[in-house]
Amino acid sequence: MIKAYEVQTFRKGVRQVDSVFDDEDLAEFEARSLFDRGRYVGVRVVLETYNPDTNELSARTVLKLEKADKSQAEIKELNGRETRKTRKAGTNKIKNENSKKRKLSGTLTAAGPVLF
């Protein structure tokens, strides 16, 4: 079995892999260091395990750090992105859902919402 610990950051609606470690303690130390700097809304450490005999890859979160003052919109966006990742890659449903959301976005005026 091959194990890797990914340190992932979340800022402005984008999750990125910052670094990869083979030691959990080092990965957690780096994650806490990045989070304490205050540049990211969230930081997490994901353990990825690869079994070459079965060609299976599994992933689980071992540490999750989030700012308590996160807005509800950021929380929904983060949860939505994680849900979409569990779907099979290459499906058009994800793109269609995103395009529908964009079409319904608008601005609020004194007369009420204006849809684009």
Image: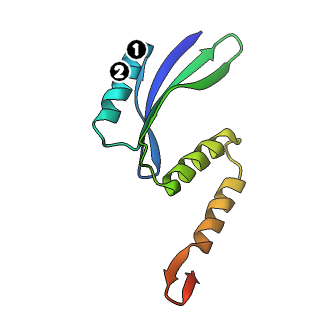
Give how far apart the Cα atoms at labels 2 and 1 are.
6 Å
Residue at x 30%, y 41% (from the top left corner): 38
Looking at the image, the residue that sits furthest to the left is 37
Nearer-the-camera pick, 13 or 72: 72
Query: Which quadrant of the figure contains the C terminus?
Result: bottom right
Q: Is residue 41 left or right of residue 115?
A: left
Q: Secondary structure at mark 2?
A: helix
Q: Which residue is mark 1?
A: 25
Tell whether label 1 touches label 2 (CB within 8 Å): yes
Residue 21: % across, % down: 41, 19
Q: Is residue 25 above or below residue 90?
A: above
> What is the x, y in percent for residue 31?
38, 28
Mark 2 = which residue?
Answer: 29
Amino acid type at image mark 2: Phe
Q: Quadrant of residue 88?
A: top right
x and y, in percent, of residue 82 in the image: 60, 42
